Image (cartoon, rainbow, N blue to C red):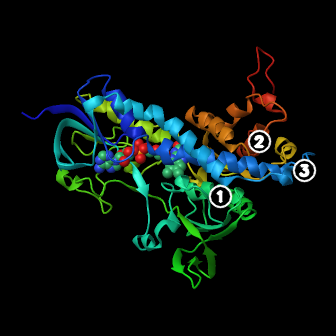
Amino acid sequence: MTHIFDVAVIGAGTAGLAALREARRHTHDVVIVNDGHYGTTCARVGCMPSKALIESANAFHRTAKLAELGIAGGERLRVDTSAVLARVRRLRDHFTKDIVAITTRLGDRSIQGRARFIAADTLDVDGRCIQARKIVIATGSRPSMPPQWRAFGNRILTSDTLFEQRSLPARMAVVGMGSIGAEISQALARLGVKVAAFGSRPFIAGLSDPAVNDALVTSLRGEMELHLGASARLETNDSGDIDVIAGTHRVSVDAVLAALGRRPNVDDLGLEHLGIALDEDGMPPFDRATRRIGDLPIYLAGDVANEFPVLHEAADDGYIAGINVTRAAPIRFERRAHLTIVFCDPNVAILGTPYAQLDHTNTAIGAVSFERQGRATLAADNRGTLRVYASRTDGRLLGAELCTPRGEHLAHLLALAISRSLTVQDLLRMPFYHPVFEEGLRTALRDLAKQLGTDRQSDLASCRPVGASALD
Ligand SMILES: Cc1cc2nc3c(=O)[nH]c(=O)nc-3n(C[C@H](O)[C@H](O)[C@H](O)COP(=O)(O)OP(=O)(O)OC[C@H]3O[C@@H](n4cnc5c(N)ncnc54)[C@H](O)[C@@H]3O)c2cc1C
């Protein structure tokens, strides 16, 4: 008789492993099926190797500022690209090792193979039949690539293949300027590759605030050729190189990084056997708060859901799915405030409600330029803009978009404030040390306070008066 597992998890990425961990708190009768490499997209080809590359690129880029800081000899430094890439892979191996061990320890409860539904409770895994009472789909996503680009062979790279390179070509195009394209194009340029980057929209790195986007575009244009607003196509030229053509621009390159977004891995999953209507992209309907697909005992977690393709959201999805597969009735979870960081320099962050989704009739916008910000000037890193959004009704912070030095830290501070429903005055009550980058945020908050009519002679007036000595 076939064994029926309590839970099957498809995909051993961040979401799948989080679901596995939660489900195993309640039952050990869990099986996980993974196709291809183990170690997760994040550690193997995503967050970690890309940030390792960026660290080397930024460290070298900083040497151009040494003379300004009074340090001579920086111009004699050079990049050893193959050493940079070797370090990226060394760190990747370090970070994937412990993750791979999680599934190895499961023994025959971990199955390598491609899972496909043949019924709502049955998977075919390369010819083997797996039945389970509840199933979590955590199959992630893969880089999008126009099929005709395959004709260019290994001269078309994606984030799946870039970190495997032993050296980098002299001239590269990066096509697609979302978060991955923005981060990697700048890193490649800083490592000495002549980069031409192309984005089909005027907005890049996921930004929607025009002022913040302009600041980032201006900054990146100082480091690379950047063409926005037209779709790019590829041709082979007479010398056998690749020409990238977008609008009136034509640029010859040795290789192209396709950073055209990612496709959820649902197309070969047999979802048509679930007996539920799929949308035009082949996606089933699901509840974001429970992760449940319709009223089936099947849950969706991580990038496969094509909602917020960032690691902490994938982990949260997996956690929710892993809890709900062990319960008779699923629990609804309130989700965290939205936070995306793009590790280009200046850092980009989008948090809470983005500019494009604001109710502009009831929103005040506080802004600060970092071009004259004190600490940024001392660090010779004075670029970028931050814009914070607050409700005109009660002064509550709604969201922010920013492109500033050390923006990753400002973003966390703002995310905390938004998560706690703090107002502009609540934040101005906080101590700001001097001289710090956070003083830039304070300038934007004071700008907001002025618009909301809550500005004071001193921020101390925002603090609660003690005893009877209240200010008039
Ligand atoms: C270049 C890059 C940089 C990034 N940088 C950041 C960052 O700085 N910060 C951040 O928060 N996020 C970042 N991300 C996003 C983050 O990596 C993802 O959100 C996260 O890894 C998604 O995890 P997941 O579990 O959904 O998918 P994955 O980790 O991709 O796991 C899915 C697994 O399912 C397997 N699978 C697929 N189909 C099947 C099948 N039919 N049967 C069995 N197994 C199957 C896959 O092979 C894979 O092992 C980055 C991503 C990329 C590509």
> Which secondary structure, mark 3?
loop
| In front of the other: 230 or 444 | 230
Q: Place residue 280 in its image quadrant.
A: bottom left
Give whichever of discs 2 and 1 has the lower sequence position: 1
- Callout 2 amino acid: Arg
Q: Is residue 269 above or below residue 413?
A: below
Considering every residue shown, the one lying at the far top of the view is 467
Give whichever of discs 2 and 3 has the lower sequence position: 3
Residue picked out by circle 3: 67
| In front of the other: 115 or 359 | 115
Residue 145, image x, y percentages:
44, 65
Q: Place residue 186 in its image quadrant.
A: bottom right
Queried on whether the Cβ of the residue with tag 2 lies below 8 angstroms from ligand 1, the answer reads no
Picture residue at 71% right of the left edge, 56% below the top: 190
Note whether residue 191 is visible: yes
- Is residue 398 shown left or right of residue 144? right
Considering every residue shown, the one lying at the far bottom of the view is 238
Q: Is residue 352 above or below residue 430?
A: below
Residue picked out by circle 1: 188
* Number of other residues with Cα within 10 Å of mark 1, as a class: few under 14, some 14 to 19, many 20 or more: many
> Which secondary structure, mark 1?
helix
- Is residue 146 shown left or right of residue 212? left
Residue picked out by circle 2: 446
Q: CA gap, disc 3 to disc 1? A: 23 Å
